[in-house]
Amino acid sequence: MTLPHPYGDSAESLRISEHPFNEILTPAALEFVASLARRYSPRIRRLLDERVARQRAWSAGEPLGFRADTAAIREGKWRVGDIPADLTRRIVEITGPVDRKMIINALNSGADVFMADFEDATAPTWHNVLQGQVNIRDAVRRTIAYDDDASGKKYVLDDIIATLIIRPRGLHLPESHLTVDGVVVPGCLFDAGLFLFHNAHALIERGSGPYLYLPKLQSAEEAELWNDVLAAAESALGMERGTIKVTVLIETLPAAFQMHEILYALRERVVGLNCGRWDYIFSFIKTRREDPTAVLPDRSQVSMTQPCMRAYTQLLIRTCHGRGAYAMGGMAAQIPVKDDPAANATARERLTADKAREASDGHDGTWVAHPASVPIAREVFAAHMTGDNQLERLREDVEVDATDLLRTPTGTVTEEGLRLNIRVGIQYIEAWLRGRGAVPLYNLMEDAATAEISRAQVWQWIHHAVRLDNALVVTSELVEKLIGSEMARIASELGTSGMQDRRFADAKAVFLRAATAEPFEEFLTLAAYELLVHGEPSLSMNAPPTPGASR
């Protein structure tokens, strides 16, 4: 097998034999990923085509609902399999990108679990995804360290650290830097494949295991795909079937109607479900985009106390606990506010209220975005529950039907809400195009999911000619006009030096296209991906297919 130099030809680069990426992109590791791609890429493409067909039907008026053909699964008596010891206590989970300093701080944060995110919190440049794999490998082996030149501080792991879970990219995202037999490899197979190849046995030897968070599933068939991919990986790597454990994010509206079915499809390895609230709101807009009765108010008004969100989260708890699986709460995007005690106190109050609601409802744990939020969330859960989880709370009082899940959130659409969507969306895209996937903006940690809400809301308001609270009708022309004034505000906030070497021209173009294009663009990250990776190196594999790969 002959592979081109994957690191560019810069004279400043390390010799390939000394480059850490070379230790990730070994021939055996690449062949392992290639074997998964050859076997499962066609199936992934078919499943993505099925998403398009289902969306076409919903847009034409076919109602969303619980599946008639899987009623036996929902009504049957079955439970998920055994759960590893280090996943039985998940009261506080912290999430973030796969950069080196973040991984160390998150593992040391006092959280029970750290989800290292190759998806919404990581801009998938070739360098970012490969350096992320290096960082994960070093973290698993406890050799990871980071020297901060600015502060002079050295970061290393504590003796006690959080349990590590990896979130690979969703089924829809490509890894364009690697082709197998002329076909681009799905990003999910690249991320999961390299992680498992390099770390599964090392994690087992340390008393843990290879654990994944699976994002953006829409159906039981997509869950079945993942189960088959992971079973094939276990076989190829010499592990017992069911060794790889997963938690599934219920972050699409279609998946909310198939929670039992998703658990069932993954029952030999699933540990729980998670309320991926931000992507869920985005999916609510996207799935029902043609429905004029499903127009959402300002993002800030779509809180977890809205009836449709309450139905979704409580149904998840009842579904999970009835099957012996964990029900994880959603992300708290609040971050500490420096030099503003009042704003910091408000952020803490909102975080506390959010986690109190989750704990009292029966969630087994929750997500936070910043290490400073870990002790706050833990204190709140400790006040509402005893023990490591709340599996005994079956929540048989919860009765949810399709009408409950589809009830449109109430509220107003304001000019300030429109302006905020524009401002946040453009600034996030600009940072993403520079390789940053998690961006603090206006006292919240924004990632791809919240940026998707911003542009999807603008699209929805234009598409349905929504009238703002000040009587203005949202049009493409109004949005273009407001982009100009919001860019002036961004420039004022950042200052002259803060605007240098930025990609705002590209970001404005991406946002405007995604907010106004007909038909609706399914994912913002797909629309911007070519701009992100333009000119980066790539690998091409054309070796004959093999039945497996050795560790």
Image (cartoon, grey):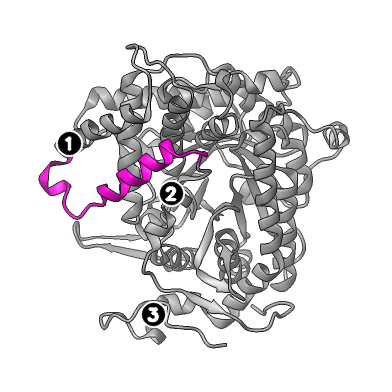
Q: Amino acid at mark 3?
A: His
Q: Who is closer to the viewer here, 4 or 534?
A: 534
Judged by its main secondary structure, the magenta piece is helix
Image quadrant containing the C terminus: bottom right
- Which residue: 24% across, 32% down? 486
Q: Residues within 10 Å of mark 3 (few under 14, many from 20)?
A: few
**Alpha-carbon span between mark 1 and mark 3:** 39 Å
Other-residue count near label 1 (Cα within 10 Å), few / some / many at <14 / 14–19 / ≥20: few
* Circle 3 SS class: loop
The residue beneath circle 3 is 19
Mark number displayed over residue 493: 1
- Mark 2 vs 1: CB contact within 8 A: no
Residue at 51% across / 63% down in the picture?
Answer: 175
Is residue 499 rendered magenta in the image?
yes
Q: Nearer the viewer, mark 1 or mark 3?
A: 1
Amino acid on which the number 1 mark rests in the picture: Glu
Q: CA distance from mark 2 to mark 1?
A: 24 Å
Q: Residue furthest left?
A: 496
Q: Do tag 1 and tag 3 residues touch (Cβ < 8 Å)? A: no
Dot 2 or dot 1, earlier in sequence: 2
Q: Position of residue 143 (x, y in %)?
A: 43, 68
Q: How many marks?
A: 3
On screen, 196 above or below 6?
above
Residue at (46, 83) in percent of width and height: 4
Residue at which label 2 appears: 121
Q: Point out the tag, 1 or 3, that comes first from the N-terminus.
A: 3
Q: Secondary structure at mark 2?
A: loop
- Crowd around label 2: few <14 · some 14–19 · many ≥20 (10 Å): many
* Residue extent of the magenta highlight: 493-520
In the displayed structure image, the side of residue 149 where residue 48 appears, left or right: right
Secondary-structure class at tag 1:
helix
